[in-house]
Amino acid sequence: MDGADTGTASGAEAPADAPPDPIADTRPPKAKSLRPLKMIWRQALNYPAHIALALLALTITASATLAIPAYFKVIIDQGFAPGSDMGRIDHAFELMAMVVVVLALGTALRFYFVSWLGERVVADIRGKVQANLLRLEPGFYEENSPREISSRMTSDTVLIEQVVGTTISVALRNSLMAVGGTIYLFWLVPQLTLWMVVLIPAVVVPIAVFGRRLRAVSRTSQDRVAEIGALVTEVLAAMKIVQAFNQENRERDRFIAAVEHSFATARRRILIRAAMTSIVILIVFGGIVLLMYRGAVGVASGSISGGTIAAVVITAGLVAGAFGSLAEVYGDLLRGAGAASRLNELLEEAPAIAPPARPQPLPRPPRGSLSFRNVAFRYPTRPEVPALTDFSLEVEPGETVAIVGPSGAGKSTIFQLAERFYDPQAGTIRLDGIPLTAADPADIRERIAFVPQDGVLFSADARDNLRYGRWDASDAEIWDAARAANAAGFLERLPQGLDTFLGENGTRLSGGQQQRLAIARALLRDAPILLLDEATSALDAESERLVQDALERLMETRTTLVIAHRLATVRAADRIVVMEDGRIVEQGTHAALARAGGLYARLARLQFAAEPA
């Protein structure tokens, strides 16, 4: 396909004011709070029973943990006192053993239900994001790198899984431990505990201060990881080009630079988080040391029992650990909020090409007429360059129209507008008399079969690649289409026939074989309008002649638009439209245009003179 026609970077130099390279700058707006986590919560609310069971298990385990210091108090006060009651000591140990069993079982249940929620929520988010991505128009992927989006779907969902499956669980458990432990300490030694409570604001302040910086750096760190993933995908997909031009060292250096850039950002995040954690621990455990000192003075004076101070020390340690862990958990929640924000952007992205509120039905049976009237169009990524200017073309049902012209003339743009991948900025396009903007895009595309210049195949078997044109096609219909496209011979020689896996992007087939499958797929669609973008360009001379014969038979009952660079393939067209700079400069039959001495005649002389006799 003509790179200049498609609006992509291939085949054309990017203008000076073009958008930044998606590999170099993929950062969306930064998350400013934990609010993006609401998206995760909304997804989790679809499973209230699992949430309830997870919360119950959390409550049980937190309560069981806090019960251990209470039993230590009983054991120390009664077990170490003169004339201790062994029966009460045995009973206390029995209860403690039961608490340990409950703690073990509760922890297992908590891990299962929380982990299940994490996996389930991530699966749902991935499915919804992918469903929305499939609704978005091709122009969205010109402005947003598919490789970077893929990275979001992997690395960001892993962070969300960690948040739901681990971080939130830890946060809730530690919150229960901190609150429950503090209440228990107040019950044991209210005056001493008051000293510790006074220190809580001193813990919250550094969390808030460092948290703002950590949130921004965490988002940037995730973006750097996404850039690495996008770079790996890009280079590995183009490995033949990399090695053909001996650019392995350059790509290695570029990757190392990206990794070092990511590491530098991660180091800043680690330093901020380490500082925040150390300050919180210093304040919390400093308060615990003060509490222990006051308790030791109380034991020495006889106002507090040894069991009480033991329970205070253990509980205070649990509370301190809970507060310290909350500081670390907050950092994880911020990273999760950044990931949720990035995915939520994809989830809430609205398609620019969408069905109208009340789509106008296309007439039945389909006629196959296509009309362009005074169409003007500029690609969103290149608004300064007109792709089509005041373009008008009427294609009658059953007519074969060839579109020729130099690269960048706007030929492929016509196809993209016909399938309503874009809407023009001016003018109207009609299919069977109905404006495309008034119809459902799905109805429009159902009436069009498209064969791109490069056969695009999926990582699936031959059968699924062929019936992509019509999913309910039978094997007999698939083989009929394959024979018409001269593909049956090599398909029959495949190890498992139609069930043979074709590799990623069909790499187990030659370029010509891939193209013949793409032609067979379009034949199978059996649509009234056929768009052929240099459809025979990848075929050898013999296969091209056989496929051309099949296409000519197919075109007898269909409206066909053919983009051709090799003029020999369009001599028999009913009409040839010659384009230059987004405008029609000539149209007519091959013979008439050759005699006219214009652009077509000049192109024909150059090509036919170069062909061997």
Image (tube, rainbow, N blue to C red):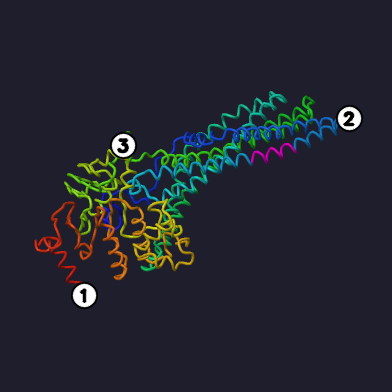
Q: Secondary structure at mark 3?
A: loop
Q: Nearer the viewer, residue 500 or 55?
A: 500
Residue 462 is one of the magenta-drawn residues: no
The answer to whether residue 440 is left or right of residue 504 is left
**Residue 456, placed above or below residue 290:** below
Question: Marks 2 and 1: in contact by CB < 8 Å?
Answer: no
Look at label 3 and name its amino acid.
Pro
The magenta stretch is 101-111
- Badge 2 is on which residue? 85
- Badge 1 is on which residue? 612
Chain-order first, disc 1 or disc 3: 3
The answer to whether residue 19 is left or right of residue 221 is left
What is the x, y in percent for residue 190? 69, 23
Mark pair 2, 3: CA separation: 86 Å
Q: Nearer the viewer, mark 1 or mark 2?
A: 1
Q: Nearer the viewer, residue 89 or 519?
A: 519
Residue under the image location 61 percent in, 26 percent down: 198
Residue under the image location 30 percent in, 57 percent down: 10
